[in-house]
Amino acid sequence: MTVESTAARTPRRSAGSKAGTTGTKRTTRTPAKKDAKGTEPQLVQLLTPEGKRVKNAEYDKYVAGITPEELRGLYRDMVLTRRFDAEATSLQRQGELGLWASLLGQEAAQIGSGRATREDDYVFPTYREHGVAWCRGVDPANLLGMFRGVNNGGWDPNSNNFQLYTIVIGSQTLHATGYAMGVAKDGADSAVIAYFGDGASSQGDVAESFTFSAVYNAPVVFFCQNNQWAISEPTEKQSRVPIYQRAQGFGFPGVRVDGNDVLGVLAVTRWALERARNGEGPTLVEAFTYRMGAHTTSDDPTRYRGDEERQAWEAKDPILRLRRYLEASNHADEGFFQELEAESEALGKRVREAVRAMPDPDHFAIFENAYADGHALVDEERAQFAAYQASFADEGGN
């Protein structure tokens, strides 16, 4: 399959068909929020959905020196990230992973921001930053091992300054803020970046992080991937103003960037990280993007959103957008795309083989790590679970 076609691999129902249980209704989206003055939110965009380069007086300088080779590198990053993400989704459906949170549609937001970081910067992800992990040198097999339940992350956070995935919504922003305050006290010129979603922006931990980072002028960038849906809740039910404008109330700048424009994301994130390194304090970046797949593999997005919305965002596909620009600028030929297609398939095969070679998770480990000493209730639960597991063996013997 071609790399662009993977964007549409999630099954969809027609807009008129019923989805899920009887009586389930999809959320009706309200018009995009306007700011306090009643105008449309400003959106930084350097590359249009048609692949046209547009000038921006404020942010052009942050990508002015980018070379054709670097552009091809960004495209390669997005293609390979999408490929192993698609493989992970397939592996979960085959019972090899317990769960998977797909990043389909958010490749530009993650690759653009990930490539903006320096080696000495520190990254605090959530559980969907597979593209950022790729940029920081984390092997995709380690990510899948965690979702298989055979490791607790699989990488040393300090080896690549990429913290372990955080499942608790929004808590990593506090960790990032504290780390950034320590960086400032150490006198280092590195920066910290914390990733979270539009749904997490409603968490108290995020608000506390904004307060502390502003008061202590912490060198941290808060990178919100607004993919429009916090599971089944649209952004309109998370905030009455555009998310990036929330920073104003805490005393630091916020900016909204087209999250499907890898050049725009790269430029804006470089700007925000530079501010942090120069001692100018925190920044909130809202990458305006879209989750084209399910929230996780346990979710069914057809229960709460229709096809028309997704189809509109598919036209803004981040990979296809950059490909159009590369072709129009003669920065890549057909040979490059064919070689990359072969490389992506090889990556998918490697990831698949690596996962299938992993051991099955220890089903009883959870009982061994609940209490330091013995506990009667845990012992009872362990015995019940053991009997349940044994029942499958008995049925197989019959």
Image (spheres, grey):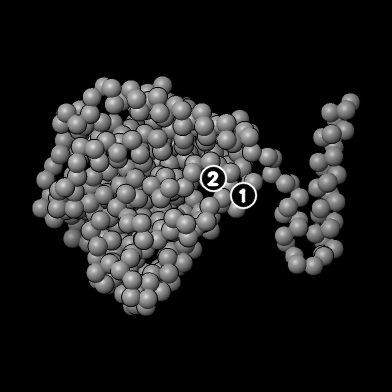
Q: Position of residue 151 (x, y in %)?
A: 62, 49
Q: Quick one: which residue is furthest to the front in this view?
A: 159
Amino acid type at circle 2 is Asn
At mark 2, the secondary structure is helix
Residue under numbered circle 1: 151
x and y percentages locating residue 285 in the rendered image: 30, 57
* Residue displayed at 41% across by 38% down: 81
Q: How far, Cα to Cα, is label 1 from label 2? A: 8 Å
- At mark 1, the secondary structure is loop
Quadrant location of the N terminus in the rendered image = top left
Where residue 356 sits, quadrant-wise, is top right
For residue 377, the mark is none
Left or right placement of residue 122 versus residue 171 in this view: left
Q: In front here: 238 or 332?
A: 332
Q: Are marks 1 and 2 in contact (CB under 8 Å)?
A: yes
Q: Is residue 315 visible?
A: no
Q: Residues within 10 Å of mark 2 (few under 14, many from 20)?
A: some
Please give left or right for residue 296 compared with residue 263 in the image. right
Q: Nearer the viewer, residue 289 or 123?
A: 123
* Mark 1: few/some/many CA within 10 Å (<14, 14-19, 20+): some
Height in image: 322 above or below 208?
Answer: above
What residue does disc 2 label? 142
217 is higher (above) or lower (below) than 108:
below
305 or 397: nearer the viewer: 397
Q: Where's residue 75, x and y in %?
A: 30, 36
Left or right: residue 337 versus residue 13 is left
Rendered location of residue 117, percent (x, y): 32, 55
Q: What residue is shown at x 33% (from left), y 71% (from top)? A: 188
- Residue type beneath disc 1: Asn
- Which residue is at 73% across, 52% downward? 365
- Quarter holding the C terminus is top right
